[in-house]
Amino acid sequence: MLDFLNELLRENEGEIKELSYLPNERLPLTLGDRRAIFDLYCTNEKGEKFIVELQKTKQKYFKDRTLYYSTFPIQEQAVLGEEWNFKLKNIYTIAILDFVFDEDKDEKVKFRYDVKLSDIDTKKVFYDKLTFIYLEMPKFSKTEDELETRFEKWLFVLKNLNKLDRIPAKLKETIFMKLFETAEVARFDKEEFRSYQESLNAYRDLKNSIDTALEEGITIGEIRGEIRGEIKGEIKGKIKIAKEMIKEGLDISLIAKLTGLTAGEIEALGKD
């Protein structure tokens, strides 16, 4: 999100160095008023607010909705219990749309709309702290080979992520590799996610143990010996369990799933 916002808003913001996520549910000021639930809501190191909405289906009053949502971070800046001069920080509402507004259909190429309060006659910006950016993704038609800027790469990913069966060569950058990894984890079912978390926890536990051992002066060779011993013990335990399962006549695929051994290893144990 930090990289995406920097590419999107660099001309307005310069470089955003830090982002903090905020609760995405904003409660109304009075009982009975409507609440707002943002897709993503964050703030930067300067206290500026960013609402990011991803809208798949067409909505008749979507512009009204984004305007309504922007009122919440405006109201939140009010200072209670002391004098306040009404000075506000910048607020950005970014809408990533999987549709095109009816009034924009004749604009075949223009897909980005930056909106601020402006004077009708002079066309000059009258107030620059409230910004709405609408990205009509169906109009973005660049192929992988046509991508030139980092921003275009972000748009390509946002539009095509669910359709990609490989990582495009032009997107083999650290930030996009991280994105693809995150997207891959997001597709896990409950069992796959549980297995992934266990593997991740085991890795973190092992790394922490190694770091601690190194700090205490234990050599890499000694650490390797200890790890080998633990691994051998774990494998012996799995083999013992697998043999018992084979005796009970359990299916090879089930034994493999429960022990982590391969089907070939289990077949070899069966022959033994």
Image: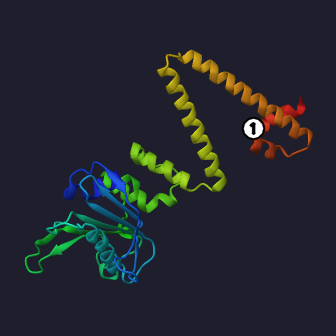
Of 38 and 262, the residue lying toward us: 38
Q: Quadrant of the N terminus?
A: bottom left
Q: Check disc 1 and give the amino acid type.
A: Thr
Image: 228 above or below 203: above
- Residue 173 lies in what quarter of the image? top left
Residue at 41 percent across and 65 percent down: it is: 24
Q: Where is residue 148 in the image (x, y as percent from the top left)?
A: 31, 52
- Can you identify the residue that label 1 sits on? 262
Question: Foreground residue, 135 or 206?
Answer: 206
Would you place residue 247 above or below residue 116 in this image?
Answer: above
Is residue 35 something that shows in the picture?
yes
Number of callouts in the render? 1
Question: Could you tell me residue 193's position as x and y percent?
Answer: 61, 51
In the image, what residue occupies the spot 63% across and 21% down? 226
* Quadrant in which the C terminus is drawn: top right
Residue plotted at (40% across, 54% down): 144
Q: Quadrant of residue 227?
A: top right
Q: Is residue 133 left or right of residue 221?
A: left
Q: Of residues 122 and 71, which is closer to you in this image?
A: 71
Secondary structure type for disc 1:
loop
Asked if residue 173 shows in the view, the reply is no
Query: What is the crowding at mark 1: few (fewer than 14 residues within 10 Å), some, or many (at least 20)?
Result: some
The answer to whether 239 is drawn above or below residue 62 in the figure is above
Observer-nearest of 109 and 62: 62
Report the side of 142 relative to 260 (left or right). Answer: left
Say which residue appears at 47% left-offset and 58% top-offset: 161
Q: Where is residue 163 in the image (x, y as percent from the top left)?
A: 51, 60
